[in-house]
Image (cartoon, rainbow, N blue to C red):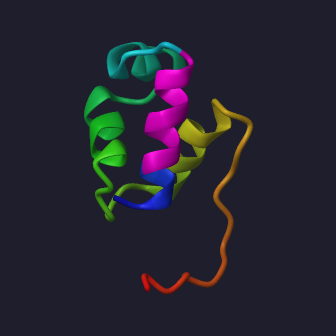
Amino acid sequence: MNKIAEFVKRKRKEAGLTQEEFSVRSGLGLRFVRDLEQGKETVRMDKVNTALAMFDMEAVPGRRENDE
């Protein structure tokens, strides 16, 4: 699982929200929330930032870290 997926899932749970509740509050589709939390790599970045904005965060361009 990627870091963004782990972060969103952890923060959502810390907020006491189900995926469905997070979906409604963020304005994102439930399928997208599920795909994001499962680490699907083809999710749209604008929607990723909508999800991250729920926790005052934003994804920005940068170099990939090694998986080592």
At a point 52% along the width and 45% down the height, the residue shown is: 7
Up the image or down, 53 lies above or below 17; here it is below
Find out whether residue 35 is within the magenta segment: no
Front one among 34 and 29: 34
At a point 30% along the width and 27% down the height, the residue shown is: 30
| Residue 67 in the image, given as x and y percentages of width and height | 43, 82
Front one among 10 and 5: 10
| Residue 18 in the image, given as x and y percentages of width and height | 37, 16
Q: In this rendering, would 39 be left or right of 15?
A: left
Q: Quadrant of residue 28?
A: top left
Q: Quadrant of residue 63?
A: bottom right
| Residue 51 in the image, given as x and y percentages of width and height | 54, 37
Q: In this rendering, would 24 be left or right of 32?
A: right
What's the magenta region? 6-15
| Residue 10 in the image, given as x and y percentages of width and height | 49, 35
Up the image or down, 4 lies above or below 19; here it is below
Up the image or down, 51 lies above or below 16; here it is below
Farthest residue toward the front?
Answer: 68
Find out whether residue 7 is within the magenta segment: yes
What secondary structure is the stretch in magenta mostly built from?
A: helix
Front one among 28 and 15: 15
Image quarter where the C terminus lies is bottom left
Q: Is residue 62 visible?
A: yes
Image quarter where the N terminus lies is bottom left
At a point 25% along the width and 34% down the height, the residue shown is: 31
Front one among 4 and 45: 4
